Image: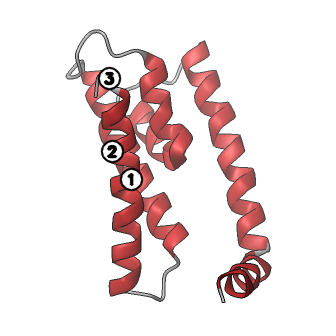
Amino acid sequence: MCCFGVRVFLLIFITVLSFVFHRLYPQIPVVAYYLLLANFLAFMIFSLFFRGALPNFVKPGAVHYFSLIGGSIGSFVSMAVFSKIRKDSFTLIELVIFVFWLILVTVVALNFIKISEFFYEFLI
């Protein structure tokens, strides 16, 4: 968790795993699998962070990365479980990331057919 490489590896891992899950059960889009895995990963990392199970040199910015890649709901659930929701900069950053993902998911959900058609024509 200390290195940038571990964070990138986990991002690549959940991306590949979402494609594998989509291959096994194609009724759910890859994006949905990705968001589920990203939120699970964020919940696990935030839980380790709040319990103090991560090394002391792990900065909050490294933990924010996991909510930034799509795990903002998992981060808030973990913050609620460990009673870490306060009026501070850590929670404010998480709120901003959550609003960003809320807007992004809404735009994708409302325009999913157009986005799918674009990539279908782009790839063929």
Q: CA distance from mark 1 to mark 3?
A: 24 Å
| Label 3 neighbour load within 10 Å: few <14, some 14-19, many 20+ | some
Answer above or below: position of 19 versus 96: below
**Marks 1 and 2 close (CB-CB < 8 Å):** yes
Identify the residue at horizontal 79%, vertical 80% (top origin).
114
* Element marked by disc 1: helix
Q: Nearer the viewer, mark 3 or mark 2?
A: 2
Please indicate, yes or no, whether residue 87 appears anywhere in the rendered image. no
Whole-percent x and y of residue 58? 33, 16
Residue 5 figure quarter: top left
- What is the x, y in percent for residue 80? 43, 34
Q: Which residue is mark 3?
A: 50
Callout 3 touching callout 2 (CB < 8 Å): no
Q: Amino acid at mark 3?
A: Phe
**Which residue is disc 2 drawn over?**
9
Residue shown at the point (51%, 69%) measured from the top left: 32
- Residue 87 in percent (x, y) is at 61, 15
In this rendering, is residue 55 above or below 64? above
Tell me the amino acid under the disc marked 1.
Ile
Mark 1 and mark 3 in contact? Answer it, CB < 8 Å.
Answer: no
Q: Quadrant of the N terminus?
A: top left
Residue linked to disc 1: 12
* Mark 2 element type: helix
SS at circle 3: helix
